[in-house]
Image: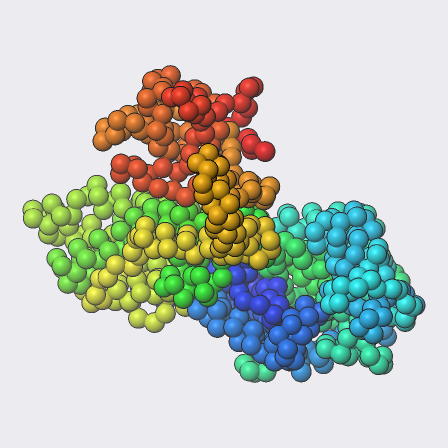
Amino acid sequence: MRNYKMNRDTKPMIVTCGLPYANGMAHLGHMRTYVPADIYVRSQRKQGREVVFICGSDTHGTPVVVNAEKEGITPKELVTIYHKHFSEIFTRMGVHFDAYGTTDDEENHVRTTDIVQKLIDNDYVYTKNIDIAYCPHCDRFLPDRYVEGICPHCEAIARGDECDQGCKKPLFPGELIDPRCTVCKNPAEYKSQEHYFFKLSEFDGFLKDYLEKLKGTDNAVNYAKGWVTQGLEDWCITRNMDWGVKFPGADGLVVYVWVDAPIGYIAFTEEWAKANNDSWEKFWKATPDAATGATAGAAADAVYDETLEKQNSEIVHFIGGDIVYHHCIFWPAMLKGSGYSLPTDVVASGMVKIEDKKFSKSRGYVVWVGEDYLDQGFHPDLLRYYLSSYTSHTKELNFGWDMLQEKINSELVAVLGNLFYRSLLFASKNFGEIPTGSVEPEILERIKQTTEDAAAAMEEYEFKKYSDTVMELASYANSYFQSHEPWALIKTDKEKCGEVVYNCLQLVKALTVLFEPVTPGKMQEAWEQLGLSGKVEDALYGEALVPLVPGAKLGEPKILFTKLEDDKISEMDEIAKKRVHLAMKEAGLVPDEEKLIEESKKKGEKMDAENKTENKTENKCEAENESALLPEITIDDFFKAQIKVGKILSAEIIEKSTKLYKIMVDVGEPEPRQIVSGIRAYYEADELVGKTVCVIVNLKAAKLCGVQSQGMILAADDGSGKVSLLMPDRELEPGSDVC
């Protein structure tokens, strides 16, 4: 294969992902970070870059200890279980790390101790007596998530290390108002204790300059700039725990988890280097002052140009949007103060919603990657494609099973898969090999331009733009196949037909190379169907332009992508609904139906016994009994229905029905909603057009008389045959929420 590189730096690159806590299962929110990072790494390697992909399990901190106590096992036992779980899930999802360690590995203990000691030696650490929450009932100090109280900044309920339900600000020991032990629920008190602080405030000038040049996504860089502008406070870096990396020279204290967790990036690189007889220093000690580390005072404020721009490596962090502060402020300050290389790019993903609802494990709005996806027989490449192509990486991603179905069926199946199968099947049946031909100049230029545009999109961390750009080439290839009609040409001019098929197969080859970062498993299958040897993941982008060899044997053509059928999607919807219902029920947000029915039955029996001789009273009892079966709902139940303002664009009669219209409604989404409504007896079709109505938009899709309906238009019925649409009393934009 030809060596092909895009025009970019040749410095060695380390790519990392935020470490998943080893205290729970992998969910869709995790994949929003790890899949794009894997796509990015694969793309960089296709440009000839030296890239090492690093991650590992975050095994320390109070969340791990709290969960271990709940399970009745040791923290070590807990993290062993979930470290294995994450490692297996990543492998199954095609996310291939060069090293995947744990923060409890010996290398991380040693490296953390080394960095902390350097910070101490460089006068960036000092001691101070501070108030620590103490629980008299449990007789212990309460670090982080063992204590909750009122946020001093916004007065929301907060945990000990972060205002997770309010302003999202990081909190330091002693800041919570009205602290309470999360274990026994009793009030805690504050006691003075000596702890260690990192002089983060001395890096103010350095960080302001550093953030001006930091690359990555705007949502990461701009967020960090806002925090630095507000002024930085020194950071308490010790905790009262037994589980973790021991703080040098301090009995009973461990380093705060946000000290040793990112240091894991370096430790895991060391593990990779040992296994591959390579150097970890070329990534992490590639700065002019790396030998000794910066010393306190002026060196901490040394301008950015003296470090990052002279750095001989690139360090790219892929993270969730909730840990920007740690990666753009704490982490680079620690590295600067101890003489290590600095992150060059920080890439933060947007949040994840499930069926238009805020992602919430406690409320059941979650998709578990193993249980709900892989174990249900879905191919990992389908989810990889959805995550990369649904929306921009920094925007909110909404997941729904029907949305997955629509995207896969209309794009991977109908466009990419259709092209591959029709081209390979036709070639196999009519030629049995790659026919004689040459690549047309227009096609060669199209492949070249697509490759350049796709690589440029990847440099901007625009994964949707990358996928869309490559999919456009697939659409072009389908049009080429269709317009040249090889099925007709084979009957009149086999040689000319061979030229057309050759060019179709060249387009298939190019798409296989270009789509490999996104759908690696399926593209390897396509590579083999083309009769090509080796692994497509090893093919550089330039291979897309290398002509196929006429006469080379083809593999057996097989369908790569099959439709996601309605029955399977309905099954997954039902699983999701049951999970939400169970979570709400456990949280006391919905009534227990069995209990209600039993209470209703007892009430009815009692009334029947008391009134069995009086007809009127008996009828009354039956009415009351019937009413009892319809329990009152909470405000949470009401808000399960998402109602939006919509404008009717068109209304058509459904011929198979005497009552139904097919109505297209603008509800503020990219495409109008198709809704089947039984209001034909009350409104003429042209009378409906232009009306502003209220629409339930999260109703499960259904087919009525063979027509799919994606919502419900609300109307009122007075019981006498009069029906009226519910409409706002003033003009509102489509998509406005009804609240």
- Left or right, 738 with respect to 614, comes to right
Q: Please state the horizontal and vertical placement of residue 212, each as a whole percent of the image.
A: 72, 50
Quarter occupied by the C terminus: top right
- Left or right, 296 with respect to 625, comes to right
As drawn, 55 above or below 468: below
Front position in the image: 666 or 716: 716
At horizontal 61% and vertical 59% (from top left) the residue drawn is 319
Front position in the image: 223 or 591: 591
- Left or right, 150 with respect to 644, comes to right
As drawn, 515 above or below 652: below
- Left or right, 635 with respect to 428, comes to right
Residue furthest front in the image: 613
Q: Please state the horizontal and vertical placement of residue 146, each as a whole percent of the image.
A: 75, 66
At horizontal 37% and vertical 34% (from top left) the residue drawn is 674
Front position in the image: 71 or 307: 71
Front position in the image: 708 or 379: 708
Residue 260 in which image quadrant = bottom right
As drawn, 108 above or below 649: below
**Count of residue discs:** 0
At horizontal 22% and vertical 62% (from top left) the residue drawn is 557
In the rendered image, is residue 733 in sight? yes
